[in-house]
Image: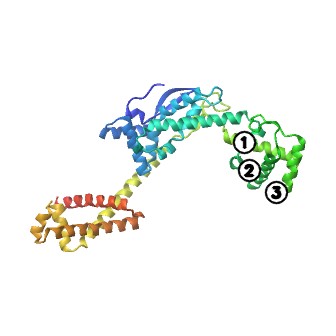
Amino acid sequence: MRSRQDPLETFSTFLQFEGDRASTWATDARLRRRMQKCLESASGSLNFWALYWLKIWQEKSDRGAVDHLTAYLQETCYWSAHKMLLNFAAVQYTLPDCFQVAIVKVEKILQNFNAQQGFNLQNYASAIFSSTIRDTLRQRQEVDICTNWALLRKVSQKRLVESLENAGLSAETIASYVLAWNCFKTLYVPTQATGTRKLPRPDDQTWTTIAHQYNKNREALLEATPTLIEKWLITCANAARNYLNPTLVSINTPKPGYDSGELLDDVPESPRESLIADLIAEEEIQERQAQRSNLNQVLETAIAQLDEELRSILRLYYAENCTQQQMATRLNIKQYTISRRLTKAKELLLKSLATWSQETLHISLTPALLQSMSAVLEDWLQTHYKNLEN
């Protein structure tokens, strides 16, 4: 596998497999354009850009940022899968299988990663990828070599119910199966160590006892014979096996019934570069422009409602860049009075801005948000009065 070197490729390409080996890097055009635009305005190491996209995702819930970071962690995931497979001698999972098992954990990794603790994202992700693959392989080995009866004794009721729900069974059927399973666990006492994976089928007398106990406790549930109970429990074991050890099908698998072509060929193209994406982007731009226009109107109205002295102070401070001492001289007011009234004017404008945000944007105000709004207001005042002078 060829290693990627530059940020543009690292944050916009994804590993492609041929059979059991990595073959090439496929470029996502949307991610490449976005990354290229960022590189035109800034430069930095791979770690710099990883932390940049992480911050974008944390602050804006930007799905594109997750895609960039998923691209970034491709090699980390690959080597984690490669290393884990070396530690398991006999498994049916291939390298691409293990890669897919792990790479889906990227968003969970991002949720738990804290750069302020001094960790490197790649090292942190490598540990999570390895743990995920190891647990999956161990679980698969355990499920593969257990007999139905050993598996039923190992599985928890929570996992059993999840397995039966995943198989699409009704609530009433699941209730019958779970009661039968509880009777089985209570009454099937193996003569060999219960920790073994090769527990044999219960004898006929045990099945009769299990059925009797089930029918005694069934209340409104379906009555069952020993043969039916055994059939139910085999269904439970198969459901648990399929749930705990799902079959992975590669999207590169040949399409059944066709001489050529892969399942990947039937996956529709991503609509992210379609007209729909353009319309959504345009709508977002229009919405931001409308909000900006409303913000201007709200603050201009708020300024107009201030008394003449406060408006003069704002004009001198932001339009003419006067110091507080210069304003005190021109307005014949003490300097400390200028300071208090400038603060009062800003507070009144901030109150108007906060009220508008609550009523229009439905934002819940917090101290941190008010501080952010104060910075926005300061920037707006400087721009507003500069434009008035021009």
Give the amino acid at mark 3: Leu
> Mark 1 highlights which residue?
154
From where the camera sits, is residue 101 visible?
no
Q: Is residue 188 left or right of residue 78?
A: right
Residues marked 1 and 3 touching at CB (< 8 Å): no
Q: Quadrant of the C terminus?
A: bottom left
Report the residue at 41% width, 54% height from top. 283
Give the amino acid at mark 2: Leu
Circle 3 — which element? loop
Q: Vertically, is 345 above or below 10?
A: below
Number of the label disc, if any, that sits on residue 221: 3
Please identify the quarter of the rendering in which residue 368 is found: bottom left
Number of the label disc, if any, that sits on residue 38: none
Circle 2 — which element? loop
Report the residue at 40% width, 41% height from top. 118
Report the residue at 46% width, 46% height from top. 63
> Mark 2 highlights which residue?
169
How far is mark 1 from mark 2, CA to CA? Answer: 21 Å
Q: Nearer the viewer, mark 1 or mark 3?
A: 1
